[in-house]
Amino acid sequence: MRSERPVGAVVRLAAPASIAVSDGTRLDFASWEGASASFTTTAGYRKVTAHYQWSYLLMLSMAPSNAGSWRLSPAVADGYYPAGSPVSIGIDAVAGMKFRQWAERLERIGESRERS
């Protein structure tokens, strides 16, 4: 939306916290160039740049689905991790179940992983 302001008027800019790119991929707001999460400036001709970082949804499954619970460190509320973030993954099996093996299917080419 374009809004006319007189030169010198105070203008507050806000950027979306997240922008969906595709299923399981989004851009998360990181910073304004030279500022913090919100940005206040005076109206006039000025270049303003919002920086975003790629984030990916980490999806985990087990068979059978009720065989245990996942441990993730660091834990995140929505399952999205910034690109390149290390994530430790563990599993706690329920009584009567035993961990058998890791199986992986990475959807993104070039992602790194370590298993132990």
Image (cartoon, rainbow, N blue to C red):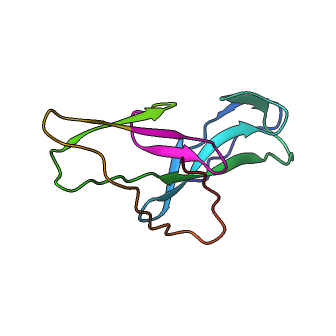
Q: How many marks?
A: 0
Q: Is residue 7 left or right of residue 19?
A: right
- Nearest to the observer: residue 23 or residue 74: 74
Q: Quick check: is 78 in the magenta stretch?
A: yes
Foreground pick, 96 / 49: 96
Q: Tell me if residue 106 comes above or below residue 86 in the rendering.
A: below
- Across and down, in percent, residue 90 comes to 42, 38
Residue placed most toward the observer, 96 or 73: 96
x and y percentages locating residue 116 in the rendered image:
54, 46
User: Which residue is found at the position 56% from the left and 68% from the top?
Assistant: 108
Q: Is residue 9 left or right of residue 13?
A: right
Q: Is residue 63 magenta?
A: no
Residue 112 falls in image quadrant: bottom right
- Residue 97: percent from left, percent from top: 18, 42
Q: Residue at (75%, 38%) from the top-left corner? A: 32
Q: Residue 17 vs residue 7: left or right?
A: left
Q: Give the magenta-colored segment's residue range.
A: 77-90
Choose top left, top right, bottom left or bottom right for residue 5.
Answer: top right
- 87 is higher (above) or lower (below) than 103: above
Observer able to see residue 10: no
Q: Position of residue 82 (x, y in %)?
A: 60, 45
Q: Is residue 59 visible?
A: yes
Q: Who's the residue at 18% across and 44% down the image?
A: 67
65 on left or right of 106: left
